[in-house]
């Protein structure tokens, strides 16, 4: 490959990079390899094997756009009215998840000898599903409409709690620091609606179709603010998505299906750069003997635990068949983005060992690979929860709602 002076990649390098990120992963999808996993592998090959792009600010900038757009998309998918529809079951799910979070954090602290803050972060990395990634992958998993509703609702509810736990954990080094960061975050939450209202009143009437650019600009700005607070880009982007969702009536275009699709397409273009950048910063020692052992232990313990918690809860609370409950648990396994982000935070701020970092990366990649293979057979069109074999799934949200009722009957 050719490079410019002073180790700066040349134009041909970027052309090959674009080809690699947007063609090779699509080819390998036929073997049920997620494009994200392939992008991480390409980054590792470029960084470890060819020493390319490792200090390239362009790739880092594109990676930032990727992580911001992915969590903006996840925030836009938050529908509190939909969540309130199944409050009882979701609250139970959150309680079970919080109990598991503290249990796993305690085990990490006792076994790994980490302080309580990094122990909680490792626990979050192991337990938190990556909502944006899961929602983007749902169409390929062949789940039913009712399963889609529960996967989305549970993933969103879990991520809301996880982001709050992440913020408190990272800012709790001192009471004063936590108070100041909370105040700044509160100001951000209060100022964002004002910005949306001003945009709706002063810009939209004179600049139609500018909603997409405004939404991305605000998401990047909020993400930079939360990054400066030490809680990474994802918190700010997620908050902007949630607030934009609340402006459905005043700014219909800002949270419309077309906007969701536009953000999803934008994310699909830039997210590969984020995963590629993660691969660039891997080291050989991350996957030495101890790192492989830690990754295998995480996979061997956490995957049955997470699937079991979801399946048992749904069996008890909704009377679901084990098959459907397990499918939902498997679909919620991917932790890819959340685990990679927390692994980076743990390495930068808490100086964890390279073996633990590598173990988290292996776990993230493993949980991402499993659903595509485990759910390779599309779900049947008829929902087996109905004794008469009829399909409860109708068109639109009403169909999802109807599909939930038989589940409660068991």
Image (tube, grey):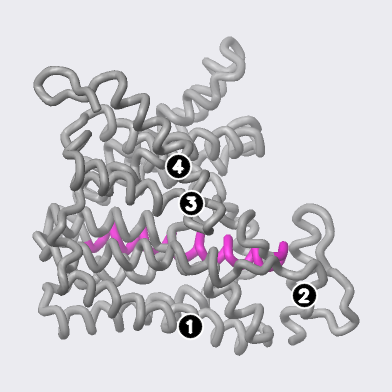
Q: Are marks 3 and 4 in contact (CB under 8 Å)?
A: no
**Residue 77: x, y in percent?**
56, 49
The disc label shown at residue 24, or none: 4
Query: Which mark is nearer the camera, 2 or 3?
Result: 3
Query: Which mark is nearer the camera, 4 or 2?
Result: 4
Residue tagged 1: 309
The disc label shown at residue 405, or none: 2
Residue tagged 3: 132
Q: Which sits earlier in the primary sequence, circle 2 or circle 3?
A: 3
Q: Which sits earlier in the primary sequence, circle 3 or circle 4?
A: 4
Q: Is residue 115 left or right of residue 237?
A: left
Q: Residue at x 28, y 42 (%)?
A: 277
28 magenta-colored: no
Task: Look at the image and tell me whether residue 27 can be seen.
Answer: yes
Measured Cα–Cα span from mark 2 to mark 1: 22 Å
Bounds of the magenta segment: 144-169
Q: Which sits earlier in the primary sequence, circle 4 or circle 1?
A: 4
Q: Quadrant of residue 160?
A: bottom left
Q: Main secondary structure of the magenta part?
A: helix
């Amino acid at each position: 490959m050719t490079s410019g002076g002073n180790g700066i990649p040349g134009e041909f390098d970027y052309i090959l990079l674009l080809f690699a990120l947007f063609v090779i992963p699509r080819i390998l999808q036929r073997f049920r390899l997620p494009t994200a996993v392939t992008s991480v592998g390409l980054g590792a090959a470029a960084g470890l094997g060819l020493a390319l792009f490792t200090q390239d600010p362009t790739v880092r900038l594109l990676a930032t756009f990727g992580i911001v757009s992915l969590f903006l998309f996840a925030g836009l998918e938050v529908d509190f009215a939909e969540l309130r529809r199944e409050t009882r079951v979701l609250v139970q799910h959150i309680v079970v998840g919080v109990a598991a979070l503290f249990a796993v954090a305690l085990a990490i602290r006792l076994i790994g000898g980490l302080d309580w803050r990094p122990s909680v972060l490792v626990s979050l990395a192991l337990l938190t599903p990556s909502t944006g990634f899961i929602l983007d992958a749902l169409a390929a998993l062949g789940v039913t409409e009712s399963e889609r509703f529960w996967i989305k609702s549970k993933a969103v509810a879990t991520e809301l709690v996880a982001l709050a736990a992440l913020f408190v954990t990272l800012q709790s080094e001192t009471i004063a620091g936590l108070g100041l960061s909370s105040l700044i975050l509160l100001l951000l939450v209060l100022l964002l609606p004002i910005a949306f209202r001003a945009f709706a009143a002063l810009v939209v009437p004179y600049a139609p179709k500018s909603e997409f650019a405004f939404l991305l600009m605000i998401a990047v700005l909020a993400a930079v603010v939360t990054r400066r607070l030490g809680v990474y880009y994802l918190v700010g982007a997620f908050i902007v998505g949630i607030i934009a969702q609340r402006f459905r009536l005043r700014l219909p275009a800002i949270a419309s299906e077309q906007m969701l699709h536009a953000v999803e397409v934008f994310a699909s273009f830039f997210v590969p750069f984020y995963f590629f950048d993660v691969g660039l910063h891997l080291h050989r020692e991350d996957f030495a003997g101890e790192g492989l052992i830690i990754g295998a232990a995480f996979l061997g313990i956490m995957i049955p635990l997470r699937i079991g918690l979801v399946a048992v809860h749904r069996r008890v609370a909704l009377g679901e068949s084990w098959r459907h409950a397990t499918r939902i648990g498997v679909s919620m396994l991917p932790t890819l983005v959340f685990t990679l982000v927390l692994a980076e935070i743990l390495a930068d701020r808490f100086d964890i060992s390279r073996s633990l970092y590598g173990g988290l990366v292996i776990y993230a990649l493993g949980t991402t690979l499993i659903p595509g293979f485990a759910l390779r057979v599309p779900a049947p069109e008829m929902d087996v929860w109905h004794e008469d074999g009829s399909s409860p799934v109708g068109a639109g949200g009403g169909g999802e709602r109807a599909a939930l009722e038989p589940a409660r009957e068991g």
